[in-house]
Amino acid sequence: MSVSSVSTGQISSCCQKSAEAEFSALAMNERFAAAHLAPEAFVLENRSGSSIEFPCLDGKSGAAYLIRSIQPTRNWLLVIHEWWGLNDHIRKEAEQLQQDLVNVNVLAVDLYDGRLAETPAVAQQLMSGLEEARAKAILNGAIQYMGSDARIQSMGWCMGGGWSLQSALMAGKQSSGCVVYYGMPEKDVTRLKSLQSDVLFIFAKKDAWINQAVLKEFETNMKSAGKKLTVLSYEADHAFANPSNPKFDKKAASEARKQAIAYMKKHLK
């Protein structure tokens, strides 16, 4: 593993289309789809959380899986699933994150409105068909649900990694931390200037999509925006932290998770 930090600078960049639109376009790339093995069947029993709904500004309801802290707290962690959807693998991870962090409420949102993918072909359709406006309405609804006094951290993988950064931007002054696992970064420097938290970016050196060029541009843009970025780099492939992925790297995944937990603990009030 290698670690780098980025703080202030004066380098500019531009963006032709949104980061999430660019990443969603990857869904129909056959090589990208082939790199994601279908998740193993899994049913989470004896759940410690509950399924909830909340209103969204587009007039629809959003859904999520909520695990509350035993003690009342203003700390929240927004968890965002990868392209398979909010399945029991993500619910289990959300429960584990709450156990590890303790003083935090964990809210795992559902960007697919109840739909799940069990095969790469279905995941391609769901991810490529995800409308930005709807995703943002769900995430904004989740932020409103947490309350105006909430201190919000976000975390996501792959598609959810990109939306983790978008969530931090949406949360404004309420954002207290952001973890991105190999997700497409925001490229608009003007938007990045509004970011109120630092970012922990977990990078896979063998990733053919969120590659060195994407990382370098993000580092440059964060410098230009005057924001702090910490990068953890691993000799691993895209989605290396997903146990169902053929390129799963147990050692790298364990180390990355340890670092992510330490980062989030430092940002808890």
Image (cartoon, rainbow, N blue to C red):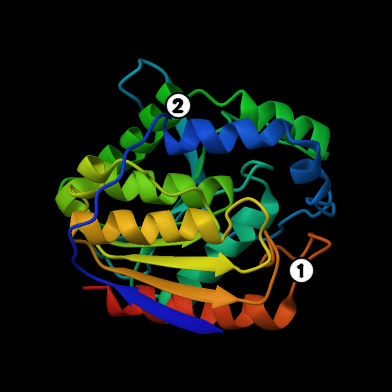
User: Would you say residue 207 is visible in this rendering?
Assistant: yes
Callout 2 environment at 10 Å: few (<14), some (14 to 19), or many (20+)?
some
Q: Quadrant of the N terminus?
A: bottom right
Residue 113: x %, y % from top left = 56, 28
Report the quarter where the C terminus lies: bottom left
- Which of 173/54 is in front? 173
Q: Nearer the viewer, residue 261 or 61?
A: 261
Q: Amino acid at mark 1?
A: Phe
Query: Which amino acid does the dot numbered 2 rest on?
Result: Glu
Q: Which mark is residue 132?
A: 2
Q: x, y percentage for residue 108?
A: 49, 50
Does the image show residue 54?
Answer: no
92 relative to 28 in the view: left or right: left
* Residue at image location 65% in from the left, 37% down from the top: 26
Whether 176 is drawn above or below 80: the answer is below
Q: Who is closer to the viewer here, 235 or 37? A: 235
Residue at 60%, 76% (x, y): give it.
234
In the picture, the disc for residue 248 is 1
Residue 134 against residue 187 in the figure, above or below: above
